[in-house]
Image (spheres, rainbow, N blue to C red):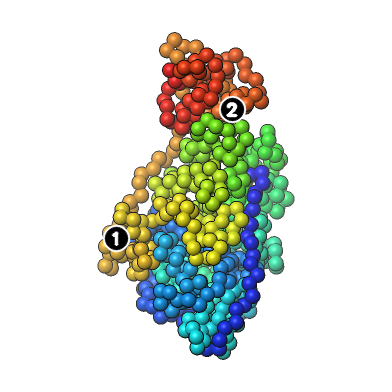
Amino acid sequence: MKNYSYKRVIAASCALVIAGASLLTSSVVNKYDKTDLTVSAAVDTWNDDWLTTDKDLIVDMNGDEVRLTGVNWFGFNCSENVFHGAWSFGTTDADGNGHADAGVHDQLKGIVDHGFNLLRVPISSELLVSWMNGAPHAVGSIAVAAPDGYNDVGCNAEFVVPGTADEPKSSMEIFDIIMGWCKELGLKVMIDIHSPDENNSGHNYELWYGKAGITSKLWEDSLVWLADKYSNDDTIIAYDLKNEPHGKAADTLSGKGAKWDSSTDEFNWKYAAEKCGNAIMEVNPNALIMIEGIEVYPKEGQTWSSPVGGYGAPENYYGAWWGGNLRGVREHPITITGASGNSQVVYSPHDYGPTVYAQTWFHMAPESPNADGEYDAKAGVFTEQSLLDEYWYDSWAYIDAEHIAPLLIGEWGLKTVAEGGTLADQKWGEILRDYMTKNHINATFWCYNPDSGDTGGLVDNDWSTWVTAKYELVEPSLWQDDSGKFIGLDHEVALGANGQSLNEYYGNTGGGTTTTTKPITTTTKPPSTTTTKITTAGGGANYGDINGDGIAGKMDDIVLFAKYFKGNIKLNAEAIENAQCDKTGDSATKIDSADLTSLINYLLGQVTNLPIQ
C-alpha cells in the first residue's frame, strides 16, 4: 500500500485511586517458571482444550471443527503495560459476583457474555523480556483499591499488593491473574507480539527486532519463555509471532523491511517465523502458531532485488495491508519441522476498509458513483467478487479456498455509519463478515477498546456500555448454533451467560465423533462476473465496454463512465455508443444517470443483459 492511516492509540493518564486499608489476597499463585493458576470458581482443569489443524480447519482433540471468533484488547503492548480500561474506576458489584462492575474481571465477563470465545492480547517483547528476567516492568494508568469497611469489593482489588490499599502488583502478576479469570470464564487467549518496545504506536515499526534492545534472539527467547511458562495450562492456545511485519520495496532492499523468501536473511519473515515456531514447539507442541503476512511481494518475473518501481507503472511488487500479503505461502510455505510441526500452523492476515486507507481495490475516487448512481466520495464501488478478484484471493483467501491451511483474520475493524463512519467502510465490513462466516474463516475483531482512533471499539468511553451498531454488525460472525447460542472453545466451561461448552455443543461425554461442518468451497480463483461481450441482437455496440477492451461492465468501465459524466474526460464515438446502457424513456436518446445506474447494476449482478430496453 502507498501509505497507512495508523491506528492511533490514545493513552490515558489516570492517577491511582486511593481507598481504605483492608486486604484481599490474590486468588492466583504467581511463579516465574511454569504457571500454577487457581481460581475460586470451578474450572476445567483437564488441560485438554489444545487445538490442531486439519487442512483448512482448526479442530479439537476429538477432531471436531472449532471456530475461533474473538476480539482484540490492547494495552500490554503500550507504555501502560496493562489493558487499557484497567483505569476504569468503580466499586459497585451489582451482580454480586465479588468483582467491581467497572473492573477488568467484569469487562472480560462482558466479552464472553457477548459471544467472543478468543481474546487476542497484544503485548511487547520489551515487557516479556522484563518478565523473563525476573524484573517485571510496572503498570501505569490503572485503578486499584482494596476493599474497606464501606465496600467489600474494592476496584480491581486482586491487583493490589497485600498490605497496601492502592499499590498495584507487577505487570506479570496482573497478567497471570487475568489469565486465571479467562480460564474461569472459558475464554481462550492468543498472544500477539505487537511491537518490540513498550510503545502506544509501536505497530508502526516494521520488524520484530531493532528497538529497545530487542534482538532477534530476545524476541524469540521471550516468546519461548512465555510458551513454556504456560505449557501446562490450555488458556493460552495460540501465539501470533509478530503483528504486521511490513516494509515497502525500498525498505526490503535496504534490509529495513520484512521480506518472504527461502533465504536466511535476518529480515526474512519466513525464516524468522519458522525458527521461532520450531523453538515454541519444543516447549509446547500443542500451541497454535499464527503467521501473519508482510506488505509487499515481487510480481511474476521480479525478485527481491528488483528496483522499487513505485506504485505507478511499472510496478514490480504487489502491495497489501501491513501483515496482509501472504502471496509467499504459495511459493515458500512455512515449514515447522519440530514436534507437532505444520499441524499447528495457521496463517493470519489483517484486512481493513477504506477509512484506514483508500486502497485501489475500493475505487474511492471522488467521482466514483455509489450503488444508487449518485456521486459520493465516501462510497466505493466494490463487491465481494471484485475484492476477491483484485485483492483478497491472491493475497490470502486462496490459502483457505485451496485447503492449504486454516486462516484467522487477526484484525478487521471499522466505524459503522451510526458511529460516524462511512458507507464504504460499513459495506466492506459486512462483505468481509459474510465471506468469513460462510467459509468458516476464523477472526479476531479490532477491537474492544474505545480508544482506537481509526476504528473505535465495541465499548464506549466508559468501558462498559456496548456500542449497539458495531456489535450488531459483528455478532453474525461469531460462532453460534442454529438457535443463536454461542459456542466456546473450552470442553467443560460454558461461554458466558449466553453460551455453551464444546462438549455441550457436540454432545461429547468423554470423546466425540469427528464432525467437520465447514461448507465445501471452490478450489480455484472465483471467476469474474463480467467476462462476456454484450451486444444487441443485430450486433453492433458492446454495451458497457467503455474502455474498449472487449469486456463489458468492469470497474474500469464504471470509473471512465463516471469521469465522462462529470465532464472530466471525453470519450470517442464507439465508447459513447457503448455507454448507452439504458434505452428506456428519455435515456434512449442521451447518456444520463440511468445509463450509469444500469451499468452498476450489471456489475452487481442485479441485471444480466445490457442495454435495458
Quick check: can you spot residue 281? no
* Mark 2 residue type: Ala
Query: What percent of the width, then of the height, locates residue 510?
Result: 28, 68
Residue beneath disc 1: 506
**Label 1, label 2: how far apart the Cα atoms are:** 53 Å
Question: Left or right: where does residue 559 sit relative to residue 118?
Answer: right
* Mark 1 residue type: Tyr
- SS state under label 2: helix
Query: What percent of the width, then of the height, locates residue 592?
Result: 54, 22
Residue beneath disc 2: 562
Instruction: Identify the image quadrant of the C terminus.
Output: top left
The quadrant holding residue 296 is top right
What residue do we see at 48% from left, 76% from top? 92
Query: What percent of the width, then of the height, locates residue 24?
Result: 50, 85
Query: What percent of the width, then of the height, locates residue 429?
Result: 49, 47
Q: Is residue 517 above or below residue 193?
A: above
- SS state under label 1: helix
Give the residue furthest to the right: 254
What residue do we see at 62% from left, 23% from top? 564
Q: Nearer the viewer, residue 27 or 467?
A: 467
Quick check: can you spot residue 57? yes
The quadrant holding residue 425 is top right
